[in-house]
Amino acid sequence: MRTLNPEALRAFHAAYDEVLTSHWPATTTQTDIPTPYGTTHLNSCGPEGAPPLVLLPGGGATSTVWFAQAARLARTHRVHAVDLVGDPGRSTAGERPVRTAADLTAWLDAVLDALGVERTALGGHSYGAWIALRYALHAPRRVGRLVLVDPTLCFAGFRPGYLLRALPMLIRPTEGRTRSFLAWETGGAELDPAWVRLRDAAVHFPAARPVTGPRPSPEALRALDVPTLVLTAGRGRAQDADRVAATAVRLLPHAETATIPDATHHSLPLHPPEAGELARAVEDFLTAPVRPVPPRPSGPPRRSRPAR
């Protein structure tokens, strides 16, 4: 079980609460849900009776990273942003560890059951998008719409240069290494100071190997009967955005893709103005009528459009 010394834990919680109080809607509620894999923490906002939207963060980012989208998406949905069990955040791992992709989907089943949600819109960024896609493949009837924000290991692999640059941070994370890596990947973008302080505090969590697995098979993706929005970062260094979009369109029967031209993998979903473009694209997708699936063209897959 992951533990943190009391002083570091207090600093982390203070930074976490600073992001919530300064950037999230004042009506945001915090909930702890027991699951077989430990206690899962959620930050929720929006009308109680509105359609649910569950959001999963990227690795190490915590649920608070959705602060730039929460208020807008809460106009039409009950937003539940989740801290991943085993990752930095307010969720706490239990005696039963999350070790496999099947454990992750069972954990998310338990979260939705505890919320009383039979069917939800589901979104994720980066590693959270990988979890969201795996869950949609596992339980497509529980996912009304799927939003994948620069999803990793879903439709393409990482660029070798990205992994090489990330290696020191992954082997021995420190505040300096994390900041240096984010500055490189985002091109020196000025990220929100409160969130950066939280990201600094997160590096003191004991390291845990994330649950990963192979990319979903083409056959599984072709069978996914869920409307899906794939948003890519036009300037991201993690993966080839064009390849991600082209593969998603080629394999998913209900895929829409859009590129946020000035975004990078780690500037999403929190850096303005790209964060606003992301919020608009997700809101438009979630509130638009479901469109019939057009016939598949016989030529090469269509290119993704810029987000507007």
Image: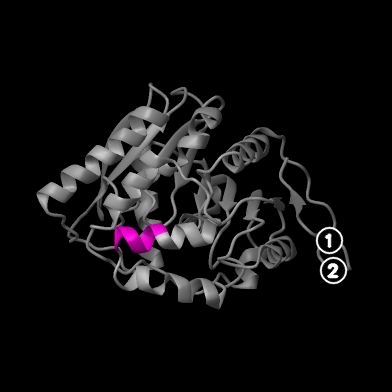
Report the magenta stretch's main SS. helix
Which of the two discs, 2 and 1, sits closer to the camera? 2
Which residue sits furthest left?
6
Residue at the disc numbered 1: 296
Q: Is residue 73 left or right of residue 83?
A: right
- Check the image and report above or below for 36 versus 97: above
C-alpha gap between disc 2 and disc 1: 10 Å
Q: Which quarter of the rendered picture does the C terminus lie within?
A: top right
The residue positioned 50% from the left and 38% from the top of the image is 53
* Disc 2 residue crowd, few under 14, some 14–19, many 20+, Cα 10 Å: few
Residue at the disc numbered 2: 300
> Which contiguous range is marked in magenta?
174-179
User: Residue 122: x, y in percent?
Assistant: 52, 45
Give the structural element (helix, strand or loop) at label 1. loop
The amino acid pointed to by label 1 is: Arg
* Residue 251 inside the magenta-drawn segment: no
Q: Which quarter of the rendered picture does the N terminus lie within?
A: bottom left
The residue positioned 29% from the left and 70% from the top of the image is 172
The residue positioned 71% from the left and 45% from the top of the image is 307
User: Residue 234: x, y in percent?
Assistant: 67, 56
User: Residue 188: x, y in percent?
Assistant: 52, 54
The residue positioned 41% from the left and 30% from the top of the image is 24
Q: Is residue 147 left or right of residue 6?
A: right
